[in-house]
């Protein structure tokens, strides 16, 4: 099994999403789902914004195709995913390879891969809450992975900007959930 581990937080050692992805990958390794781990830090080594010429370089796509499990750290920035992660998605959502258009509509071709996403958000965006309509990170990631045939699993640390106590509680709770995800 090959795990592709991707981090996208700009916060380095203080990052909650980085803590969570590390924990998820560790747990996967101990439950036998592990094997080779390929690590990509899209902040230390960012992909450029998409251009037509960029499609000629299929290395990111091929790395994704070769992975069985993909673990992604996704902090919420300005209500959605970091541009570093969007640049990666732009290279793996490829018509004819990861999805195709059919007479019956689009069809995802990546079924069988496991995608686990560690979300870290400063606020709370629960259904029915005042900010729910501002949530475009989890919703977007679910939509784009569904589109290519994958149902992503999420673990979320929320309310991280509310107070230091809330931050500690939320990270602890999310780290606990990584055990369930790796089971
Ligand atoms: C540039 C920037 C933009 C942010 N925008 C939002 C936002 O729109 N909504 C929110 O709830 N939190 C926002 N936050 C807070 C982060 O989601 C929060 O700090 C989270 O912990 C980031 O993940 P990380 O700890 O892995 O870096 C923002 C943080 C930064 C640095």
Image (cartoon, rainbow, N blue to C red):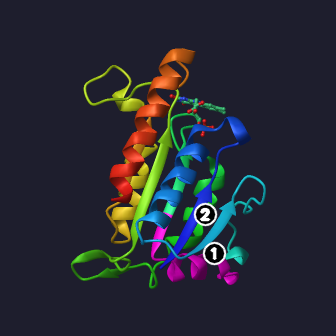
Contact? badges 2 and 1 (CB < 8 Å)? yes
174 horizontally vs 168: left or right: left
Q: Quadrant of the C terminus?
A: bottom left
Residue 136 visible in this rendered orientation of the protein: no
Does the magenta-highlighted stretch encompass residue 67?
Answer: yes
> Which image quadrant for residue 15?
top right
Q: At 48% across and 19% down in the image, what residue appears?
A: 166
Q: x, y percentage for residue 163?
A: 54, 14
Q: In this image, 82 relative to 101: left or right? A: right
Residue, disc 1: 60
Residue 141 coordinates in the image, percent (x, y):
43, 53
Q: Which residues are magenta?
A: 56-70
**Disc 2 element:** helix
User: Does the magenta run of residues contain 7?
Assistant: no
Q: Identify the residue shown where x is 36% and y is 54%.
A: 181
- Residue at 54% of width from left, 75% of height from top? 64
What residue does disc 2 label?
88
Spot occupied by residue 102 in the image (x, y as percentages of width and height): 29, 83
Mark count: 2
Classify 10 Å Cα crowding around label 2: few (below 14), some (14-19), many (20 and above): many
């Amino acid at each position: 099994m090959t795990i592709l581990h991707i981090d996208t937080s700009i916060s380095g050692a203080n990052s909650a999403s980085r803590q969570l992805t590390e924990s998820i990958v560790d747990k996967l390794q101990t439950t036998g789902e592990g094997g080779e781990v390929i690590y990509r830090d899209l902040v230390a080594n960012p992909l450029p914004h998409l251009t037509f010429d960029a499609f000629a370089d299929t290395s990111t796509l091929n790395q994704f195709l070769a992975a069985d499990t993909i673990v992604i750290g996704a902090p919420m920035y300005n209500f959605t995913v970091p541009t570093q992660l969007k640049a990666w998605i732009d290279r793996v959502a490829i018509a004819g390879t990861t999805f195709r258009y059919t007479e019956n509509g689009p069809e995802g071709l990546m079924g069988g891969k496991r995608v686990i996403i560690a979300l870290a958000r400063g606020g709370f965006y629960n259904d029915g809450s005042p900010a729910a309509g501002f949530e475009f990170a989890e919703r977007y990631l679910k939509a784009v992975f569904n589109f290519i045939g994958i149902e992503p699993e999420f673990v979320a640390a929320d309310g991280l900007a509310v107070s230091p106590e809330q931050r500690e509680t939320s990270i602890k709770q999310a780290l606990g959930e990584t055990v369930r995800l790796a089971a």
